[in-house]
Image: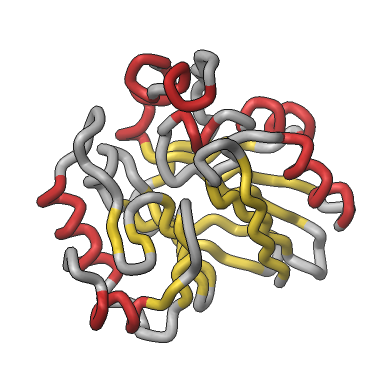
Amino acid sequence: MIVERIVVGKYAVNSYFIMDEETKEAAIVDPGAQAHLIQRVIDEYNAKVKYVLLTHGHGDHIGAVETIRDENQAKVVAAEEEQDMLLDPKKNESLATIDREVAFDADWYVRDQENIKLGQLNLKAIKTPGHTKGGICYLLDKYLFSGDTLFRRSVGRADLYGGDFGQLINSITSKLYVLNEDVRVFPGHGPHTTIGEEKKENPFT
């Protein structure tokens, strides 16, 4: 298994490249901008991108989705609760965050706890609403891709469309803090952390 972080855009979004080494099947988590940087990593590994996995639909996380999807014939995965945001540039704030309007539909709207097969790898979609209505984290073995739900010593904002702070904290404590403490958390911005560290040190939870 290969996992690489690719920091993109003016908001320094963490996009992630995940690949099963045996089959070369890959996924991109939150291709927010600068598709050429993401595609460069894909090409370096000669990867077959099967999925674009969205943790949520804010503009800074979706700016390169269509380019990566079309270039690789990939399927876009999101939560059904996020559909209205993906389809509406005003709700996803793409003009404000990446200076152009973005609107598209996902190909696969996953359910909570649904598995996503990537070669020999299995990712689990964990719905964590609060930052947005359709926030998702993706669990892959001891790796958690948390989007803007959980950060190192912080949590996502809840003052934009679909946000609910109480729901966000409940999602973190009831869905994420029940995972093994050694699970490594790879957030949508900033450095990685672990579930154990955040349970002890995060001032918001």
Q: Single out the residue that lies furthest toward the left.
A: 166
Q: Is residue 141 or residue 200 the one in the foreground?
A: 200
* Residue 104, above or below 26: above
The image position of residue 74, as x and y in percent, is 69, 37
Residue 2 location, x and y as percent?
A: 72, 68
Residue 120, quarter of picture: bottom right
Please tell me whether residue 197 is drawn above or below residue 72 in the rendered image.
below
Q: Position of residue 186 (x, y in %)?
A: 49, 64
Between 191 and 63, the residue placed more toward the observer is: 191
Kindly identify the residue that appears in the image at 51 percent across and 71 percent down. 143
Which residue appears at 15% of the width and 47% of the height? Answer: 165
Residue situated in front as seen by the camera: 150 or 137: 150
Front-lying residue, 46 or 148: 148
Quadrant (top left/top right/bottom left/bottom right) for the C terminus: bottom left
Side of 112 relative to 118 (left or right): left
Mark count? 0
Quadrant of image for the N terminus: bottom right
Residue ID at (86%, 57%): 45
- Residue at x 74%, y 46% (from the top left corner): 49
